[in-house]
């Protein structure tokens, strides 16, 4: 087996979010890479700074206070590489989700083939699709031109034809796009061409003057499996270009980072893939990142990675978008007290107006967590459209069994009690069977995903050292039972032989304390007809690790069926909240 | 540890500079140091309304790459409806084939045997918005206008702008706008009211022909109806029935009867622009300071509380925790102690994330 070469250098990661810029220091301690410390500061991508590096400096000064290590020279420049006396860092990994929400127009031949694939490419990045043009478009050419002009696209993704296949129709559409782009005021739009590779020269000829042309391999080279990964990478480069040209400081930071600022969603997907390939990987891993302006969902099953970004749906800046994607009732069902539609809508818009704010009291927390639950449900539903059919759960609306759910974003990292955070994740994703719940408490996933390209060993070593919060092992039970009936019982035995018996009752949440760092065996004896992940009524004993919330039994059924009667629903939501340690 | 919260400007007297730019390039009509009034047209342009394509080669009966000699209008040239853009005499000159423009506008571009025409229906005139001095001109785009005066930044606007005399109605900072408050004497004025909670006054506002509305808060469910109103609406503090913060209300009611510029252009995080109201005021001999942004949170800073039970209250930071503390709801975060203004016995602990520096 070939040895993996790596250097024992310090790594600084920086992630530029819409609301927050986060830095983390990774370094070698006693021969192994360790996460040393993290810090954060409000992002400065917008006014009055309009310079990403300012927020990075604020965060680095905090990191300096925490670690006692200097990072900036007297001119406030990052010291890179580190000096002999340990000042500065040896490498920088930069990622960004904030700053660019690219308006996209999708162009292709057939809605169900090339357009669908182009949409999946667009949804892997921070784009909002403004319009689509394809062969079935009934608008006249001039109307299509007006549509492109109205869309004011930053990027046009053009797909269609297998290699050596259709050409005439695509070139005709290219003429329309070329005319429209010629008329677009301001900076040239970027054109990402991912269609019939034989047309590249003609595409350059037609669109080279009016757009900045990027090429990626055909996403449908043959009429078989699509090939999306190279196109996603190229789209990431387009974002990189857009950021560097539109936001101050990114050029310098990209230079420090070896020429690239990677999209956060892409590097997080890389990290989730790493988790699946190295740490887990029997069934599948899902990562959620609930950001201020965007929500991403990455799923990996057997090395097939599906990443989906809801670029204009987050829990801060774009939170009001939720009300256009989901009826108000769907949000309201998660609120454990009476609230009028009007007041709830006011809450959502006020949150959008003050996206950086935090829940100040328990009522406010319930409202914020209701938002989080519903945003994730919407993002998950959109992401699942891009999942292959074989990833279905036992019923279409239920998730397939997962090894791990990893949650990122300030909502999780600042979670009040571990059980409350676990409940939020279980409500939002509603997994089945046995699932380990992890929280990216220091926002490391994006940076580690980026570092994995350079130094996979560092990522592997850091993951194993507790940098991610082990929330616990969730046991999600499915089956029919009367409320309050014992649906699963058994015991958990730790390595010292200490036994803790438990009973999970239908309709209830049960926490069994099993602290972080502890290992043991969990025996499951589900009632006949109830499935704990190993078949209805089948008993099983498995290895478990401890977590901040312990072992979490969710016996509320799948999908979770909240009572329509408000008082009964309030009672249940409050009961679940307090039974996992939440304040009343 | 350094924390830089957002800055909100509610300022009694400052030097204010605003970019006034066209949406598409055009002609700038003012010069640096020129004095402008609110209604001075500082730049103008023509906004293409729509495009149309003429199949020139097909109509002339020539190959697509051979239309050049037959074009009587060139790219960029203005055209009138029914005016010829291409003419071809047939063999022996017995007859003429004419391709005519179907729009009033311009021939944008020809190629592939086709001509793209733009219909111009919108003459767009950009006005200064408020009286001031032209500080800078950006060729083809617009100008930077400077004035002195009071400014109140808001959180939401309906995208419209206007300038007129400001009149406050109602009994206080949270008093909702009522139908009966809209007397005919308010005709042509910009109204200041605590909150907008329903649509009952909308018809009356049209009858009275008010020129704008500034409210402390508004029900979010009214948003789409408010966007359809013909005049600007500015919300300064929040959604709901909370009304104005005391400082915003004091500034606006204190300038009752003066002229105000209401800009309901939505907030843009990238440029830092917010919807706002500007009350031009004569400056002292020494110009007042420019509006500042980007200060760090520190003891002594004046702040507005953006969320929680004390939302929209104004106060001063009296202590700042460096370490995170646990709130009663379980969240761990850095807190600041705020002494609420005009309420000496009211001291509250607030997450620093819920504060805005007030300038």
Image (cartoon, coloured by chain):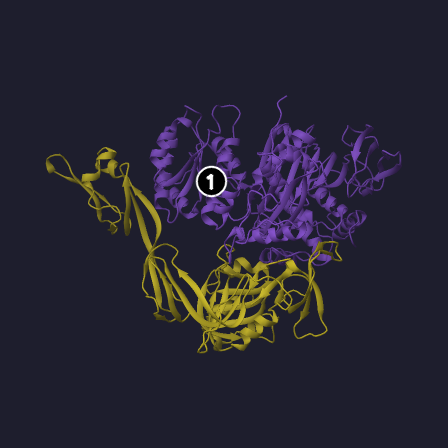
Residue A277 visible in rendering: yes
The location of residue A128, given as percent across then percent down, is 51, 44
A560 sits to left or right of A55: right
Q: Nearer the viewer, residue A231 or A60?
A: A60
Quarter of the picture holding the N terminus of chain B:
bottom right
How far from the left and from the top, in percent, is residue B68? 21, 39
- Secondary structure, mark 1, is helix
Q: Tell me which chain appears yellow.
A: B
Q: Is residue A260 above or below residue B157?
A: above
Left or right of residue B207: residue A36: right
Q: Is residue A152 depicted above or below B192 in this figure? A: above
Residue that extends furthest to the front in the rendered view of this protein: A84
Q: Position of residue A374 (x, y in %)?
A: 65, 46
How many numbered marks does the figure carry? 1
Considering only vertical position in the picture, is A180 above or below A195?
A: below
Nearest the viewer among A536 and A61 is A61
> Residue visible at 46% across and 49% down?
A246
Disc 1 packing (10 Å; few <14; some 14–19; many ≥20): many
Residue under mark 1: which chain is it in?
A
Residue B181 appears in the picture as rendered: no
Chain letter matching colour purple: A
- Image-quadrant location for residue B317: bottom right
């Amino acid at each position: 087996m070939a040895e993996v070469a790596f250097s024992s250098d310090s790594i600084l990661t920086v992630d530029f979010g819409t609301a927050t810029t986060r830095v983390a220091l990774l370094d070698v301690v006693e021969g192994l890479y360790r996460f040393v410390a993290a810090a954060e500061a409000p992002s400065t991508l917008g006014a009055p700074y309009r310079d990403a590096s300012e927020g990075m400096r604020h965060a680095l000064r905090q990191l300096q206070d925490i670690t006692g290590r200097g990072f900036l020279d007297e001119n406030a420049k990052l010291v890179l590489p580190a000096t002999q006396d340990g000042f500065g860092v040896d490498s920088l990994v930069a990622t960004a989700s904030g700053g660019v929400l690219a308006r996209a127009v999708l162009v292709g031949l057939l809605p169900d083939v090339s357009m669908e694939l182009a949409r999946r490419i667009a949804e892997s990045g921070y784009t909002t699709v403004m319009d689509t043009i394809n062969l079935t478009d009934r608008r006249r050419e001039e109307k299509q031109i007006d549509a492109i002009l109205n869309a004011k696209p930053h990027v046009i993704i053009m797909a269609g034809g297998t290699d050596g296949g259709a050409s005439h129709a695509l070139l005709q559409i290219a003429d329309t796009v070329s005319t429209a782009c010629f008329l677009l005021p301001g900076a040239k739009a970027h054109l990402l061409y991912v269609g019939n590779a034989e047309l590249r020269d003609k595409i350059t000829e037609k669109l080279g003057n009016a757009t900045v042309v990027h090429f990626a391999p055909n996403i449908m080279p043959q009429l078989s499996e699509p090939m999306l990964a190279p196109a996603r990478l190229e789209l990431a480069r387009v974002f990189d270009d857009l950021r560097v040209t539109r936001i101050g400081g990114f050029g310098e930071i990209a230079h420090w980072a070896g020429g690239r600022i990677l999209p956060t969603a892409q590097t997080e997907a890389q990290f989730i893939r790493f988790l699946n390939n190295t740490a887990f990987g029997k069934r599948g891993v899902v990562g959620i990142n609930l950001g201020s302006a965007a929500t991403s969902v990455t799923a990996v099953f057997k090395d097939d990675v599906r990443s989906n970004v809801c670029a204009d749906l987050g829990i801060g800046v774009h939170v009001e978008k939720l009300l256009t994607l989901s009826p108000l009732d769907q949000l309201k069902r998660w609120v454990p007290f009476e609230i009028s539609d009007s007041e709830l809508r006011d809450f959502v818009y006020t949150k959008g107006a003050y996206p950086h704010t935090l829940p100040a009291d328990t009522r406010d927390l319930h409202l914020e967590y209701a938002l989080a639950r519903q945003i994730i449900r919407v993002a998950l539903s959109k992401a699942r459209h891009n999942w292959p059919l074989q990833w279905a759960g036992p019923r279409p609306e239920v998730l397939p069994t997962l090894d791990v759910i990893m949650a990122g974003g300030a909502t999780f990292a600042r979670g009040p009690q571990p059980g409350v955070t676990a409940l939020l994740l279980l409500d939002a994703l509603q997994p089945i069977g046995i699932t380990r719940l992890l929280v990216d408490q220091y926002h490391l996933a994006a940076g580690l995903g980026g570092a994995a390209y350079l130094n996979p060993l560092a990522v592997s070593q850091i993951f194993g050292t507790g940098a991610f919060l082990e929330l616990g092992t969730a046991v999600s039970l499915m089956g029919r039972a009367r409320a309050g009936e014992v649906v699963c019982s058994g015991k958990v035995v730790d390595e010292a032989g200490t036994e803790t018996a438990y009973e999970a009752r239908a309709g209830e949440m049960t926490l069994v304390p099993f602290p972080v760092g502890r290992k043991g065996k969990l025996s499951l004896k589900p009632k006949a007809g109830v499935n704990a992940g190993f078949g209805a009524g089948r008993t099983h004993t498995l290895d478990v690790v401890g977590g901040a919330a312990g072992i979490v039994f969710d016996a509320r059924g799948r999908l979770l069926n909240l009572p329509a009667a408000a008082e009964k629903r309030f009672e249940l939501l409050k009961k679940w909240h307090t039974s996992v340690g939440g304040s009343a | 540890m350094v924390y830089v919260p957002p800055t909100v400007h509610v300022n009694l007297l400052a030097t204010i500079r605003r970019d006034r730019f066209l949406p598409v390039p055009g002609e700038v009509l003012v010069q640096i140091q020129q004095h402008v009034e609110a209604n001075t047209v500082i730049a103008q342009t023509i906004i293409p309304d729509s495009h149309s394509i003429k199949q020139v080669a097909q109509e002339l009966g020539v190959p697509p790459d051979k239309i050049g000699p037959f074009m009587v209008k060139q790219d960029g040239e203005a055209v009138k409806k029914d005016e010829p853009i291409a003419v071809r005499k047939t063999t022996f000159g017995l007859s003429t084939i004419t391709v005519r423009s179907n729009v009033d506008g311009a021939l944008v571009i020809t190629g592939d045997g086709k001509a793209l025409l733009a219909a111009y229906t919108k003459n767009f005139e950009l006005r200064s918005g408020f009286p001031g001095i032209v500080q800078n001109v950006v060729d083809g785009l617009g100008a930077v206008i400077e004035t002195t005066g009071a400014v109140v930044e808001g959180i939401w606007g309906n995208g419209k702008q206007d300038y007129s005399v400001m009149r406050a109605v109602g009994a206080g900072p949270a008093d909702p706008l009522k139908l009966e408050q809209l007397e005919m004497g308010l005709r042509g004025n910009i109204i200041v009211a605590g909150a907008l909670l329903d649509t009952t006054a909308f018809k009356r506002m049209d009858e009275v022909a008010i020129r704008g509305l500034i409210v402390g808060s508004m029900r979010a469910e009214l948003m789409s109806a408010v966007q359809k109103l013909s005049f600007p609406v500015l919300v300064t503090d929040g959604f709901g029935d909370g009304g104005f913060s005391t400082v915003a209300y004091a500034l606006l009611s204190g300038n009752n009867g003066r002229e105000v510029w209401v800009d309901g252009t939505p907030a843009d995080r990238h440029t830092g622009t917010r919807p706002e109201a500007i009350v031009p005021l004569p400056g002292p001999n020494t110009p007042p300071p420019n509006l500042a942004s980007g200060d760090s949170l520190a003891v002594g800073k004046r702040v507005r509380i953006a969320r929680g039970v004390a939302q929209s209250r104004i106060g001063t930071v009296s202590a700042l925790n460096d370490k995170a503390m646990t709130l009663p709801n379980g969240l761990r975060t850095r807190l600041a102690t705020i002494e609420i203004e005009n309420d000496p016995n009211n001291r509250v602990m607030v997450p620093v994330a819920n504060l805005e520096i007030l300038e």
